[in-house]
Image (tube, helix red, strand yellow):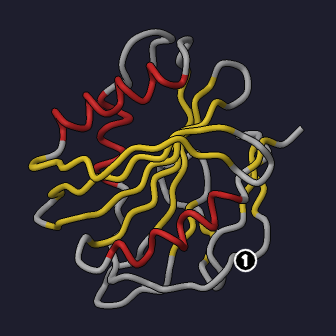
Amino acid sequence: MTTQGSPDMKTISFFAAVFILSVPVFAAGTGERHVESAGGFSYCPPKDWAVKEVPGMKFKAALGPAADGFASNIVIVDESFSGPLSDYVKATVQALTKTFKGLKNLGQTDFKTDSGLKGVRLIIQSEQQAHLLRQTFFFFDGKDGRKLVVTCSTLAEGGARLDDTFTASMKTFALEK
C-alpha cells in the first residue's frame, strides 16, 4: 500500500471477500476482551461469538453462530496512510462505490469509543457475489501512521438489528500501549 492516496484494490478486494455471511445473530452484550498485540488494539467481540484465524488475514475475525451456511462477522485490517482519517474515509468511500454493485450509503457519523478513541462509522448496503449485504465500517487512527478499519458484515435483510451489537462491540475498541 502506498502511504498517500486511496486504499488499494487489495484492500477493497478484502472487503468484498470477507463477508463470511450469515443470517442476523442477535447477541446481547460483549464477550471477553480480545487483544491483537501485532496490531496494537483490542476489543470485546459480541458475547458468544468465536474469535478465529482466517486464512490470508493478518488479524483474527469474530464470527457469529452460523445459520444456513452463513456467519455474521467482524474483521479488521490495517493500512498505511499518511493523511488524516477524514481523507482516508473519503478515499475508501470512493473506492467502495466503484467496487461494489448498487452501493447505498446508509449513513456516516463520528464515533467515539469508551476509551475516548475518535473514529468514523459508515454503514453501507451493497450486492456482493449475489448477496445483498449490510456492512458497518469503523475507521480509527492506529499506531505508526496506520489506519484501522473494522468491517462488521451481515445479510442486509434484518441486518439493522445487529447495529446495536456491532456498536456495543466497537465501543470497547482500544489502542494497546
Residue occupied by mark 1? 31
Q: Residues within 10 Å of mark 1 (few under 14, many from 20)?
A: some
Depth check: give the residue in front, 124 or 38. Answer: 124
Residue 154 in the image, given as x and y percentages of width and height? 35, 70
Tell me the quarter of the image containing the C terminus. Answer: top right
Q: Residue furthest bottom?
A: 67
Tell me the quarter of the image containing the N terminus. Answer: top left
Residue 131 in the image, given as x and y percentages of width and height? 16, 67
Residue at (29%, 41%) from the top-left corner?
Answer: 13
Depth check: give the residue in front, 154 or 115. Answer: 115
Left or right: 172 in relation to 127: right
- Is residue 96 placed above or below 75 in the rendered structure? above
Say what amino acid the circle numbered 1 marks. Gly
Residue at (72%, 77%) from the top-left corner?
Answer: 31
Left or right: 158 in relation to 55: left
Q: Residue furthest right?
A: 177
Q: Which of the 4 quarters of the picture holds residue 161? A: bottom left
Residue at (35%, 23%) from the top-left corner?
Answer: 91
Residue 115 in the image, given as x and y percentages of width and height? 80, 48
